[in-house]
């Protein structure tokens, strides 16, 4: 998928919303659990209902692998089924594997093979702490993206990401290095919504890449501030909301409530 195709969906749907599929069994409504024979099955029923309800109001889904891997083989099977389901019913949706893998050489190559060949994701999040070798194996897949964690939304991100290196914060050094070995057609960056005040200055040295922006909703980030400060000529934003959409209601109307929140989030 090209950035122009992503932008076309943003314009068509009038939103930059990415729905994070962080499906926590403990938070799934009891009405869903009652229909399922296992925790994994409950997760699949719930996730599919959320997808069907929110697909008209978002341009991307971001399954968080930890919430599926926690249930072993059954959880991975649910994830694979969910990807196939979205591909078959909503082929225009951009699919992100929120995996935050970070390794070098043949290991990174196998991660790329896993997510791009076996599971058919459009993008995967990567932690760049081990250097550019953690990124380069993902760049050889046309139409696929590596999303490098640069400036995240969690409070302790400043422990490392804001540390000065050569007169620049470390996240900027990371981004500039990654930009030097890639293009906007195969590289995106994680920039947290809770750091919206940084977006304008980041856009000065990174004008063309898409940003995946977590932290809207439950973490307190403002989609309006992100759009105002971080947009470029192609929007350049995928604004993620997870818990705020998924758990908008704990009753039988959970899907309708999720759709309502999604329809109101990250509008342009």
Image (spheres, rainbow, N blue to C red):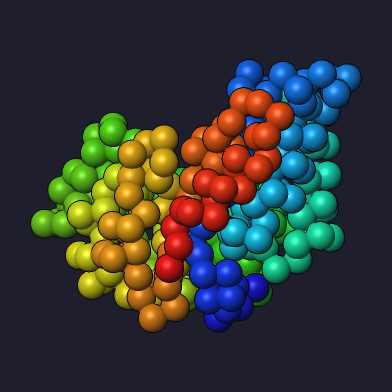
Q: Is residue 96 above or below residue 37?
A: below
- Residue 233 point in image, percent of width and height: 38, 81
Camera sees residue 257: yes
Could you say which is closer to the camera, residue 10 or residue 161?
Answer: 10
Could you say which is closer to the camera, residue 128 or residue 29?
Answer: 29
Q: Quadrant of the N terminus?
A: bottom right
Q: Answer with the quarter of the image where residue 24 lies.
A: top right
Q: Residue at x 44, y 78 (%)?
A: 234
Q: Quadrant of the C terminus?
A: bottom left
Q: Is residue 156 above or below residue 265?
A: above
Q: Is residue 225 above or below residue 144?
A: above
- Residue 43 point in image, percent of width and height: 74, 30
- Residue 198 point in image, percent of width and height: 22, 56
Q: Residue at x 59, y 59 (%)?
A: 57
Could you say which is closer to the camera, residue 39 or residue 185?
Answer: 39
Q: Residue at x 73, y 34 (%)?
A: 46
Camera sees residue 123: no
């Amino acid at each position: 998928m090209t950035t122009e195709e992503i932008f076309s969906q943003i314009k068509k749907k009038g939103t930059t919303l990415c729905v994070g599929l962080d499906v926590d069994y403990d938070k799934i409504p009891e009405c869903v659990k009652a229909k399922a024979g296992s925790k994994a099955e409950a997760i699949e029923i719930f996730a599919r209902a959320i997808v069907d309800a929110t697909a008209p109001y978002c341009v991307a889904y971001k399954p968080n692998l930890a919430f599926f891997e926690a249930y072993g083989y059954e959880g991975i099977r649910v994830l694979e089924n969910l990807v196939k389901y979205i591909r078959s019913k909503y082929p225009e949706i951009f699919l992100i594997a929120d995996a935050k893998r970070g390794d070098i050489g043949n290991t990174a190559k196998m991660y790329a093979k896993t997510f791009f060949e076996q599971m058919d994701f459009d993008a995967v999040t990567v932690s760049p702490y081990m250097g550019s070798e953690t990124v380069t194996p993902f760049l050889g897949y046309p139409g696929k993206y590596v999303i490098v964690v640069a400036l995240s939304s969690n409070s302790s991100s400043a422990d490392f990401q804001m540390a000065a290196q050569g007169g620049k914060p470390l996240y900027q050094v990371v981004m500039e290095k990654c930009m030097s070995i890639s293009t906007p057609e195969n590289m995106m960056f994680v920039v947290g919504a809770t750091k919206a005040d940084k977006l304008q200055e980041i856009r000065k040295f990174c004008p063309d890449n898409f940003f995946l922006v977590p932290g809207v909703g439950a973490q307190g980030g403002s989609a309006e501030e992100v759009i105002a400060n971080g947009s470029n000529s192609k929007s350049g934003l995928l604004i993620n909301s997870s818990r705020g959409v998924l758990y908008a209601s704990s009753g039988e109307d959970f899907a309708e409530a999720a759709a309502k929140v999604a329809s109101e989030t990250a509008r342009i």
